[in-house]
Image: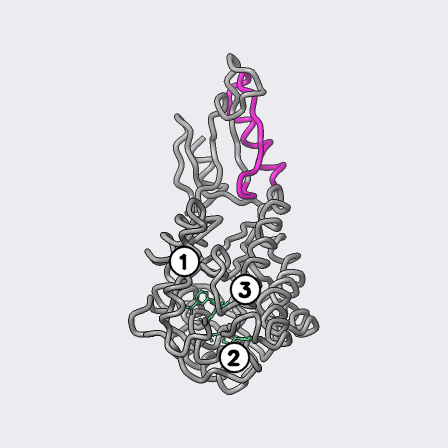
């Protein structure tokens, strides 16, 4: 059995057949594989296939335990544990020219993935692609605005034209804003929603067919602000809450397809996002009101997202402050209103009264 599985699953196989075990598996023709496997197990064994996280599972059923207790009566012969590596994967990263997106391009690229990045600024795009190639990474990209549906269609077509497929889409592009609701120009909130929420919808829509064929991953870079509303970031928090709702539904709809969906929630991470943040009238803030040097680096954040993708995790919540915020907010929302208000009010030039 081991030899057979080894032949089918190749070098990525780590397999034990005597007890329940998990290993990576993907197969071009599941039926052939099932037939071949079935012929190898004893005739008394009732062999079944199923999927978990979309990768094929094989298991034998224990004849003494009824079928309606599947969790107790099966011995898994082969199935998924994680993506063992990202070699030869094609990764599309929106907003890959700065901060977390750029770090993700280097992280996935250094593990053997081909990288396709976007951003609105041609110069930053060219510079980032050149930097990736200098490090031996296969990289391409195009200027695109995620909030423009047509750009996302072109992005998917161009990435497939360049590399033949898309395995992973990282919906990273995003902007922030800083103003309280009573003062903000509503166009600012709309702009943030257009990029942070609708941008993800469009990009995912056009990349999903290829990702589904490859049983790949859709990743949304959300935020702790998608779990806990931040005063003075009304449009940003609302866009990330909407994003998380979208990702949760997508993950559930994709349950039987093999597509993995990750909601990645960084805490405060050093990047350009606060400098580029929009103020109440839509002008760019120009500087960060927080100590960027005390934050998690974009590179560390990218390493965590990479590992969560390998493990096909559903959620990634980063930083101690972030984890604590999510936990406390679930159980003590009233207390957290005061805590969060005080923390945000201490920012330089806070818009909070
Ligand atoms: N840094 C943090 O503290 C933090 C925390 C939690 C979550 N996040 C999330 O992490 C993601 C990346 O942010 P970052 O901190 O790395 O910010 P960043 O340094 O400002 O990078 C943002 C990237 O997105 C691109 N982008 C912005 N608007 C775009 C659009 N309409 N179309 C295409 N690309 C666009 C930018 O390039 P162009 O401007 O040239 O288009 C840039 O490449 C965002 O979704 C953000 O909400 C950040």
Q: Where does the magenta region start and end?
A: 30-55
* Residue at the extreme top: 64
Residue tagged by mark 1?
338
Residue 284, how many percent across, how many down?
51, 83
Tell me the CA gap for discs 1 and 3: 32 Å
Q: Is mark 2 within 8 Å of ligand 1?
A: no
User: What sort of colour scheme is used for the picture?
Assistant: one colour
Name the residue rendered at 61%, 55% in the picture: 246
Of labels 2 and 3, the one closer to you: 2
Residue 199, how many percent across, how many down?
62, 68
Residue 249 colored in magenta in the image: no
Residue 43 colored in magenta in the image: yes
Name the residue rendered at 60%, 76% in the picture: 188
Q: Is residue 247 above or below residue 57?
A: below
Classify residue 327 as left or right of residue 122: left
Name the residue rendered at 41%, 58% in the picture: 338
Mark 3 residue crowding within 10 angstroms, few (<14) / some (14–19) / many (20+): many
Tell me the CA gap for discs 2 and 3: 24 Å
Residue tagged by mark 2?
279
Which of the labelled discs sits on residue 320, or is there none?
none
* Residue at the extreme left: 294
Q: Say what secondary structure mark 3 lies in.
A: strand
Which of the labelled discs sits on residue 171, or is there none?
3
Ranked by sequence position, the earlier of labels 1 and 3 is: 3
Q: Say what secondary structure mark 1 lies in.
A: helix
Viewer-proximal residue among 252 and 214: 252
Residue 242, how many percent across, how many down?
59, 58
Of labels 1 and 3, the one closer to you: 1
Ranked by sequence position, the earlier of labels 2 and 1 is: 2
Mark 2 residue crowding within 10 angstroms, few (<14) / some (14–19) / many (20+): many
Ranked by sequence position, the earlier of labels 2 and 3 is: 3
Q: Say what secondary structure mark 2 lies in.
A: loop
């Amino acid at each position: 059995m081991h030899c057979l599985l080894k032949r089918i699953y190749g070098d990525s196989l780590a397999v034990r057949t005597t007890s329940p075990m998990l290993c990576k598996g993907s197969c071009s023709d599941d039926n052939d594989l099932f037939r071949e496997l079935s012929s190898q197990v004893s005739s008394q064994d009732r062999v079944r296939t199923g999927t978990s996280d979309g990768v094929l599972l094989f298991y034998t059923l224990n004849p003494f335990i009824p079928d309606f207790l599947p969790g107790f009566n099966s011995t898994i012969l082969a199935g998924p544990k994680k993506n063992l590596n990202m070699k030869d994967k094609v990764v599309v990263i929106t907003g890959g020219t700065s901060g977390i997106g750029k770090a993700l391009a280097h992280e996935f690229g250094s593990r053997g993935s081909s990288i396709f990045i976007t951003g609105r600024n041609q110069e930053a795009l060219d510079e980032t692609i050149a930097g990736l190639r200098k490090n031996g990474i296969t990289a391409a990209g195009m200027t695109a605005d995620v909030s423009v549906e047509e750009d996302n269609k072109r992005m998917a077509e161009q990435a497939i034209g360049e590399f033949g497929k898309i395995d992973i889409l990282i919906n990273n592009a995003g902007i922030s804003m800083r103003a309280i609701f009573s003062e903000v120009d509503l166009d600012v909130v709309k702009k943030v929603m257009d990029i942070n929420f609708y941008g993800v919808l469009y990009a995912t829509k056009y990349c999903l067919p290829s990702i589904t064929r490859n049983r790949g991953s859709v990743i949304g870079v959300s935020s702790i602000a998608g779990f806990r509303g931040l005063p003075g970031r009304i449009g940003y928090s609302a866009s990330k809450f909407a994003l998380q709702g979208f990702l949760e539904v997508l993950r559930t709809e994709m349950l039987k397809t093999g597509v993995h969906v990750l909601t990645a929630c960084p805490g405060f991470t050093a990047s350009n996002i606060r400098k580029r943040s929009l103020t109440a009238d839509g002008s760019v803030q120009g500087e960060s009101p927080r100590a960027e040097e005390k934050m998690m680096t974009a590179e560390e954040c990218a390493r965590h997202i990479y590992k969560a993708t390998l493990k096909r995790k559903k959620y990634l919540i980063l930083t101690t402050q972030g984890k604590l915020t999510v936990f406390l907010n679930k159980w003590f929302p009233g207390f957290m209103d005061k805590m969060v208000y005080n923390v945000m009010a201490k920012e330089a030039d806070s818009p909070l009264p």
